[in-house]
């Protein structure tokens, strides 16, 4: 199975924060992959922008190292890598001052006929100053787009502020808010599964679905990001964006088309239908955790507080919660969400747990009849499994087993799974906002998150400790087991 390559129009992509972690780990490798994939037109130019003084050749050397480190086999890709590096330029710019802006404007003016894209791979406090200068130095017109990454604010009020500042310079249809989970292959497959098959949609409601689980588990700790992470915590870092976006894609009504606003309107309705979690119920439907020293991938690892170098933090590194979508389709169906750092495995999956059969025609000797489950594995080992009851083969009466109809994509399609950024960057150039968050979505998500944060503040309890390398605090297991259900075991 080969993928289709649709070339994009010529573009000039300015990467602010070009020497930083995101540019090195994700953006440059993704652009290189699309270049070898034959998708970048000859005229495509990438302008690295940062405060650090360096020559264009220094920047190319940095990009060469980044690509070699993050793209398997790239170090040996001589001519292709050289062709990619030849696209790169570099300008020293002070995001909060005046230095370099005229040079940047002159360079971009000399690259006319290309779609201008400004990617702000910087700290969020620079979004405002950069946008203001993009406007002032004549870089926001001419169909220019701006791309920003989360965190977009740390609560509703600050998110509104960020959106206002950007909105003064760029109209909403040229603002691209990235949630990289939406660019993941299997996340898009969720839409294909739901809306390109007649099989599931009739069952996709409270009459047939018992509950939904969304797990995004990471085995890594906070690594070098403890100082950012400590000001955010898991609810802001993961739930407000990635997990809620997944929930929206599971729960939304079929959109009339995949046109950006058609899809985003449906996601927004889900966010608005989420039952509030606040003071009254936060203690019973949410769990916060923080990892202690333990073992991960066979080795001993320190606890969060040791990594942070402070024993005072009450920031959560784990969240489990029970959400409900209060509408006709989903009333009464719990959506259990859990995510955390330093868990037992890196696994992200969505489980649709169907209701049990209403009556068993079999006698007890066949064994238990377990409910069907649809498990959508986002990473690793992307694929879909549909758990069914079947008869054990062989003579000697009927015995039943719960087995998966297994479609692991790596086996079914021998294609490389592109990184989310490869798709998302090119979607910006194409002007396709379908996989980006609209302003009202981001704000609606904060509107639901804020009362949880407030309830936690008022509860004034430390997060529950859990040992690194486990599935989080036992209260997370209790959260779902109280309802007579269990978290999906890893390996399902
Ligand atoms: C980021 C979070 O948005 O997503 C990180 O800030 C997290 O804390 C990461 O590790 C997870 O992304 P992925 O693609 O590795 O699952």
Image (tube, grey):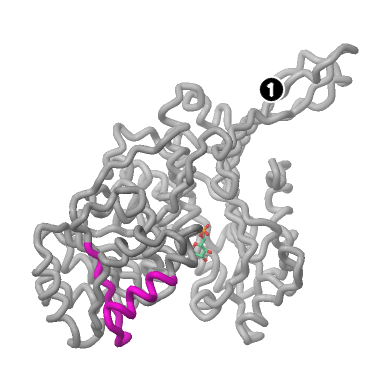
Near mark 1 (Cα within 10 A), the count class, few <14, some 14-19 or many ≥20, is few
Quadrant (top left, top right, bottom left, bottom right) of the N terminus: top left
Left-right relation of 283 to 126: right
Which type of secondary structure does the marked residue at label 1 adopt?
loop
* Percent x, y of residue 232: 50, 72
Left-right relation of 472 to 31: right
Q: Can you tell me whether the CB of the residue at mark 1 lies under 8 Å from the nearest atom of ligand 1? A: no
Viewer-proximal residue among 428 and 56: 56
Task: Tell me: residue 159, above or below residue 425.
Answer: below
- Residue 398 is a magenta residue: no
* Percent x, y of residue 418: 44, 49
Asked if residue 360 shows in the view, the reply is yes
Quadrant (top left, top right, bottom left, bottom right) of the C terminus: top right
* Percent x, y of residue 62: 39, 75
The residue located at (72%, 70%) in the rendering is 465
The residue located at (25%, 82%) in the rendering is 95
* Percent x, y of residue 407: 59, 32
The residue located at (57%, 59%) in the rendering is 280
- Residue 52 is a magenta residue: yes
Left-right relation of 48 to 228: left
Left-right relation of 320 to 26: right
What range of the chain is rendered magenta?
45-65
Q: Quadrant of residue 90?
A: bottom left
Asked if residue 333 shows in the view, the reply is no
Total numbered labels: 1
Query: Mark 1 — residue?
Result: 357
């Amino acid at each position: 199975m080969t993928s289709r390559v649709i070339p994009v129009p010529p573009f000039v992509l300015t990467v602010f924060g070009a020497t930083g972690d995101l540019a090195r780990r994700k953006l440059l490798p993704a652009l290189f992959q699309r270049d070898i994939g034959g998708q970048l037109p000859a005229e495509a130019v990438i302008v690295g922008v940062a405060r650090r003084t360096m020559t264009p050749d220094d920047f190319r050397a940095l990009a060469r190292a980044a690509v070699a480190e993050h793209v398997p086999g790239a170090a040996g890709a001589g001519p292709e890598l050289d062709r990619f590096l030849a696209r790169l330029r570099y300008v020293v710019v002070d995001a909060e001052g005046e230095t370099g802006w005229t040079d940047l404007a002159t360079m971009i003016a000399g690259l006319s006929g290309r779609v201008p894209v400004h990617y702000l791979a910087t700290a969020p406090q620079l979004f405002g100053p950069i946008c203001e200068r993009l406007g002032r130095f004549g870089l926001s017109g001419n169909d220019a787009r701006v791309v920003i990454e989360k965190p977009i604010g740390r609560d509703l009020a600050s998110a509104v502020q960020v959106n206002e500042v950007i909105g003064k310079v760029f109209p909403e249809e040229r603002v691209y808010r990235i949630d990289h989970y939406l660019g993941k292959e299997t996340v898009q497959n969720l839409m294909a599964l739901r809306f390109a098959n007649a099989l599931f949609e009739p069952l996709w409601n409270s009459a047939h679905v018992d509950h939904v689980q969304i797990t995004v588990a990471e085995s890594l700790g906070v690594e070098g990001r403890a100082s950012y992470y400590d000001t955010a915590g898991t609810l802001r870092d993961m739930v407000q964006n990635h997990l809620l976006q997944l929930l929206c894609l599971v729960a939304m009504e079929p959109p009339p088309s995949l046109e950006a606003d058609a899809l985003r309107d449906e996601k927004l309705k889900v966010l608005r239908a989420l039952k509030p979690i606040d003071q009254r119920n936060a203690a019973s439907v949410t769990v916060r955790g923080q990892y202690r020293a333990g073992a991960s991938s066979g080795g001993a690892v320190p606890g969060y507080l040791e990594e942070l170098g402070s024993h005072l933090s009450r920031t959560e590194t784990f969240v489990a919660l029970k959400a409900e979508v209060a509408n006709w389709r989903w009333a009464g169906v719990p959506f259990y969400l859990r995510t955390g750092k330093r868990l037992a495995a890196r696994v992200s999956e969505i489980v649709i747990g169907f209701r049990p059969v209403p009556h068993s025609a079999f006698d007890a000797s066949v064994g238990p009849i377990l409910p069907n489950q649809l498990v959508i594995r986002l990473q690793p080992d992307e694929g879909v499994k549909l758990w069914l009851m079947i008869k054990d083969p062989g003579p000697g009466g009927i015995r039943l087993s719960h087995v998966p109809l297994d479609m692991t994509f790596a086996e079914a399609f021998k294609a490389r799974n592109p990184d989310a950024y490869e798709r998302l960057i090119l979607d910006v150039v194409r002007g396709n906002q379908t996989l980006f968050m609209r302003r009202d979505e981001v704000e609606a998500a904060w509107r639901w998150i804020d009362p949880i944060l407030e309830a936690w503040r008022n509860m004034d309890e430390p997060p529950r400790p859990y040992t690194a390398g486990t599935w989080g605090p036992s209260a997370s297991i209790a959260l779902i087991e109280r309802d007579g259900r269990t978290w999906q075991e890893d390996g399902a």
